[in-house]
């Protein structure tokens, strides 16, 4: 994996150094002896190579020096400037020389990328651990999605069953209402008949001379909600009086009576109170 970043950087550095040396010798060789131009080219490449080697040594030790980095980039910019100047002053193929003038900067950029890769590189053990964590997270997410889908399907099945049960209850209620309506219609017909009305009157109330009580049908129809009607007999017992009666009945035997026994004796004694108030009184005295 290390070769994927270091080999391009090495190749680009070699090409840029050779190109810089050739351009310096060709360009300055016309104005000075070629050995001097060769020394200038080797000086630029040598300075760049020396700073690069020192940077790599510091990177291997986990260190960094901004001064060395700045000097290295200065040599890279100087080499690029030489190539650009040669391209601008060349009489032939100026565009081609200008097209390769970016190679020194590109080489420095590749070494920068390689340094970043080295600082972020992980060992195979760490990479395996990261892959294991990612796989575990994917497994948990898949299990969570499957659980949600199963719960959604279960809830859909439950709602379907409840809806079907409600529909069955509605159908039963409809049939019951129809049956009751038919029964009440039959009773009304019987009551309206002269012979059957007289017979029903004779068995529903005592016949007295000159008085024929009328036999009435029970009322069947919409009724008021239970919560809107008074659950207490008139007059209703106060809470204090109810507490006294409940306590007397509860402690009438030893051990004390349970709530069901007390409630049964309370109603058998002729007292009247709602189940809610009776249980509240039991809680207060017990």
Image (tube, grey):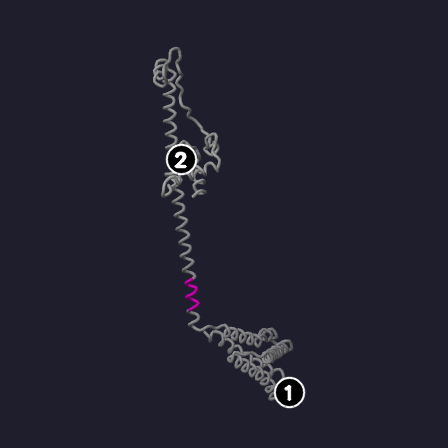
Q: Answer whether residue 64 is magenta in the image.
A: no
Tell me the quadrant of the picture where the N terminus can be found: bottom left
Q: Is residue 25 visible?
A: no
Task: Find numbered disc 2 in the image and state the secondary structure of the residue it sits on.
Answer: helix
Tell me the quadrant of the picture where the C terminus can be found: top left
Look at the image and give the residue range highlighted in magenta: 129-136
Q: Residues within 10 Å of mark 2 (few under 14, many from 20)?
A: many
The residue sitting at the top extreme is 210
Tell me whether the residue at label 1 lies in contact with that at label 2, contact meaning CB atoms closer than 8 angstroms.
Answer: no
Q: Which residue is mark 1?
A: 32
Q: Residue at x 41, y 59 (%)?
A: 140
- The percent position of residue 141, horizontal first and vertical second, equals 43, 58
Closer to the camera in the image, 201 or 88: 201
Of the image marks 1 and 2, the number of the one nearer the N terminus: 1
Q: Residue 266 bears which disc, if any?
A: 2
Q: Residues within 10 Å of mark 1 (few under 14, many from 20)?
A: few
């Amino acid at each position: 994996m290390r070769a994927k970043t270091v080999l391009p950087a090495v190749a680009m550095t070699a090409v840029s150094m050779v190109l810089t040396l050739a351009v310096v010798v060709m360009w300055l060789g016309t104005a000075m002896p070629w050995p001097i131009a060769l020394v200038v080219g080797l000086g630029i490449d040598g300075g760049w190579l020396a700073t690069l080697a020192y940077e790599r040594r510091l990177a291997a030790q986990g260190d960094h020096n901004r001064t060395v980095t700045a000097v290295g980039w200065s040599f890279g910019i100087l080499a690029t400037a030489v190539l650009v100047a040669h391209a601008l002053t060349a009489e032939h193929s100026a565009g081609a020389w200008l097209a390769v003038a970016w190679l020194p900067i590109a080489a420095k950029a590749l070494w920068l990328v390689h340094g970043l890769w080295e600082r972020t590189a992980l060992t195979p053990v760490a990479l395996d651990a990261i892959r294991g964590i990612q796989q575990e997270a994917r497994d948990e997410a898949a299990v969570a999605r499957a659980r949600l889908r199963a719960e959604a399907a279960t809830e859909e099945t439950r709602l379907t069953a409840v809806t079907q049960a409600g529909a069955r209850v509605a159908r039963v209620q409809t049939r019951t209402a129809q049956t009751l309506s038919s029964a009440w219609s039959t009773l009304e017909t019987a009551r309206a008949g002269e012979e059957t009305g007289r017979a029903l009157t004779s068995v529903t109330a005592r016949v007295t001379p000159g008085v024929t009580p009328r036999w009435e049908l029970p009322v069947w129809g919409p009724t008021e909600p239970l919560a809107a009607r008074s659950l207490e007999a008139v007059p209703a017992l106060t809470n204090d009086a109810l507490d006294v009666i409940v306590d007397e009945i509860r402690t009438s035997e030893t051990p004390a009576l349970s709530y069901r026994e007390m409630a049964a004796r309370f109603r058998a004694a002729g007292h009247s109170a709602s189940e809610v108030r009776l249980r509240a009184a039991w809680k207060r005295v017990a």
